[in-house]
Amino acid sequence: MSRILLIGLLAAAAIALSGAPSNAMPPFAQAYGVNCTVCHTEVPGLNAYGRYVQRTGYAALDPHVLKRSLPLWFGWNPSYDSNNQTPRLQNGNVAFHAIGGIANNDWTYHIQQWITQSNQPGTLDTAWVSYNNLFHRSGHLFFGKIEAPGPSPWSQWMDLANFAPPQIAVGEHTYDLAVNRWGTRFSYVRNSLDAEVGWFGSSAGIGGSSDFANDTDKTVQWKLADANPNYPLELGYYGARGSFPLPEGGTDQFYANGIYAQRDPYHGAPGVLFMYQTAFDGNAGAGAGPAASNAAALELYEPLFKQRAVVTARREFTNDGLGNLTQFGNVDFEYHLARFVHVYVETYLQSHQKPGYRYMLWWTTPLSSVK
């Protein structure tokens, strides 16, 4: 009851303070004065235009408009998961963000520092800077702790469950295709073409920025997509080639290839997201030898209540090539409750585990008023 009361009080306070609708990046929404549906199906899941803004490192936005708002914002997301070892409300999920551009968006940046995470001291989640004045502003060179090339929903999606294919575990190697990692990425974005390639190392906090030791997973990752920002359908191919140091000694050389398709909700039809991935590990560790794995995910999502909410349903599987086939499923409901306040509820299941449910409230706010 105390959990419900806490969320109710927060929601009531947010409604009392509400004015205009918000965006997942509050300074952007505040500066432009637009509805979140310009970039999002439901925060933080991006539509075709929002994905375009994301892959350009925000350089697609008008730098003069962005000056209307201070590029700082704060977020808090208390959450609960019934299958945690000690199920209880996690109040300590607090993050601080700095996000924006300088020199007419020749340079853009995003920093996210967890102040606390799961009631523990937080770490650095995101820290990148991008130079965007390359190839007539179609080229974007990123440095820092960044998102690796891949489908946008890996990093920006409204479900509470992560996607299984990019995180498949094969023997002693867990893939980190959808994890923010230290490295560099080049993106060429022109009309419908999205071509990206990057090199990535550690996923640790600030200490990972200088971790080039042999015991760190190192990966080259890429993506090629047909992604028109004005058209709801995106089709793409992604891949990775890397090496993983095995705990007992030796190295696992691995590669992955995947295809994906995403179509935003359009003319009354629900949105669809599909991905299929294959991978090969030359040495899965612990005497397992080589392994050829595959994984897939299919999700349908439909906006409701004049795009203030969305309901989603997903089915996934992973096959690690070592005799372990795991199936996953989740159904989510997300609602834009008030200005800067979103509520997320999910029920989920996984092979050989009991079903569970979780929920989260996400409150975000810019740290300044519009100039």
Image (tube, helix red, strand yellow):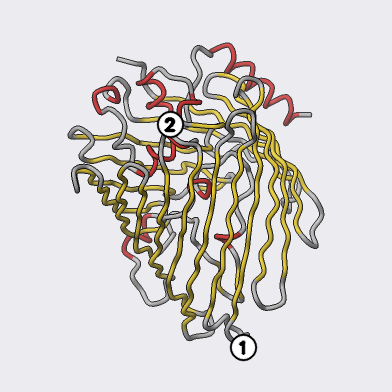
The residue sitting at 66% across, 64% down in the picture is 318
What mark, if any, has residue 350 been given in the picture? none
Left or right: residue 206 versus residue 36 is left
Residue 250's spot in the image, x, y percent? Answer: 47, 86
Quadrant of the image for the N terminus?
A: top right
> Residue 326, relative to residue 332: is it above or below?
below
* Residue found 27% across the figure and 48% down from its top: 140
Please give the label number shown on residue 287. Answer: 1
Q: Quadrant of residue 63?
A: top left
Q: Amino acid at mark 1?
A: Gly
Pick the front one: 327 or 346: 327
Q: Secondary structure at mark 2?
A: loop
Q: Amino acid at mark 2?
A: Met
The dot on residue 25 is 2
| Residue at the extreme front | 267
- Of mark 1 and mark 2, the one earlier in the sequence is 2
Label 1 sits on a secondary structure element that is: loop
